[in-house]
Amino acid sequence: MSAVRRLDVALDARSYPIWIGRGLLRDAARWRAAIRGRHVLVVSNATVAPLYLDTVLAGLDGLQAASLVLPDGEQYKTLEHCGEVLEALAALKANRDACVIALGGGVVGDLAGFAASCWMRGVDFLQMPTTLLAQVDSSVGGKTGVNLPAGKNLVGAFHQPRAVVVDTDTLASLPAREYRSGLAEVVKYGAIGDAAFFAWLEREADALAARDDEAVAEAIERSCRHKAGVVARDEREDGERALLNFGHTFGHALETAGGYGRLLHGEAVAIGMVLAAALSADLGLAAAADAERLQRLLGRLGLSTALPDGSDAQALLQLMYLDKKNLSGQLRLILWRGIGAAEIVAAVADAAILQRLRRG
């Protein structure tokens, strides 16, 4: 096993570790210490479970452990499937000291974490993310929730995990499209607040696209370190944490418009970031050259930045009004002053957004 990288999310109430390294799912001696009770439910999906579920269950020997395997896909991140997790906890007779382990990508982590926040008003959970997107973003910070037909993540809670276990070996089984989707969230961290990291990504783009082990591990650590710092300063998204949604207001609208199946989350975010950067240039906030630089990097990493064919600008704008960052019926977008300098911008005119959506 290669050296394990560790960093911590330091919150006022408590902190929790993020471990990054190879073979960590097999290293039960490390992560089992985060489990305080005897009841454990492992939630996974039909793609991940055949690959890694037995390994995790073997690490729970001696505890009262059960598993639940859900269908794989964003379209299954629903209240109905959250109910299945709660019923599984009931069948396990799980107590207040129970633990839910989320073994999978962002859908599993969000849904299982939300169920853990609901069971007996909140029990422990561990994140074991198996996709790059989940490893660098959704597994860290305690955002949990499910989708509604009306919009993405409209039902949810802040519920921090006890630990995040990032086993980079799981990326070997990740399809190319899923891997590229995760790289969009990596780029986001450089775009919103770390110009040096953005430049590093430009230099290492070919290595990242080829899944070079050292480059990937470094990208995961730097992404997690950035997010951990933001979460520690603004756990419940009262200010700075909203910047992590750069590209997401556009992206979530695109995901909802496509029925949560046409675009992967990272694919939608890649398009959304370029739209946000281009809109910033339209409004005179940033140079158009920075938006072009962002678009080039995403392209080198294999991500499309073009709106899907048939996109309806007016329909997308209406979906954007359901975004959780909005206040008093006004859109609040995350735009930028250029690479590494994102900010919250309120009351952007609908006409400017529609013009940008129509131009693509």
Image: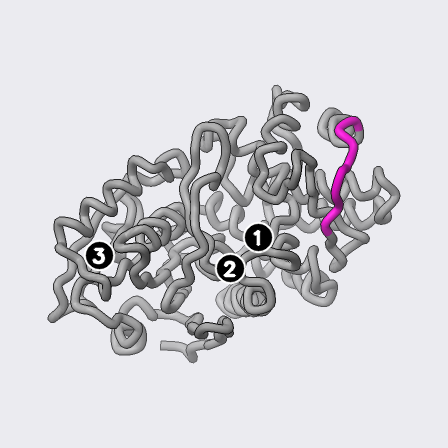
Q: Which residues are magenta?
A: 344-351
Is residue 187 among what the camera can see?
Answer: no
The reply to whether the C-beta atoms of the residues labelled 1 and 2 are less than 8 Å apart is yes
Checking the image for residue 185, the label placed there is 1
Image quarter hosting the C terminus: top right
Residue at point 80%, 43% (across, down)? 280
Figure check: 204 above or below 1: above
Q: Which residue is mark 3?
A: 41
Residue neighbourhood size for the residue with mark 1, other residues' Cα within 10 Å, grouped as few (<14), some (14–19), many (≥20): many
Where residue 320 appears, as percent x and y from the top left, is 62, 33
The reply to whether the C-beta atoms of the residues labelled 3 and 1 are less than 8 Å apart is no
Image quarter hosting the N terminus: bottom left
Q: CA distance from mark 3 to mark 1?
A: 29 Å
Q: Which residue is mark 2?
A: 136
Which quadrant of the figure has residue 171? bottom left
Q: Give, as a three-letter code, the residue at label 3.
A: Leu
Where residue 83 appears, as percent x and y from the top left, is 26, 41
Q: Give, as a three-letter code, the residue at label 2.
A: Val
Instruction: Say which label, 3 or 2, has the lower sequence index.
Output: 3
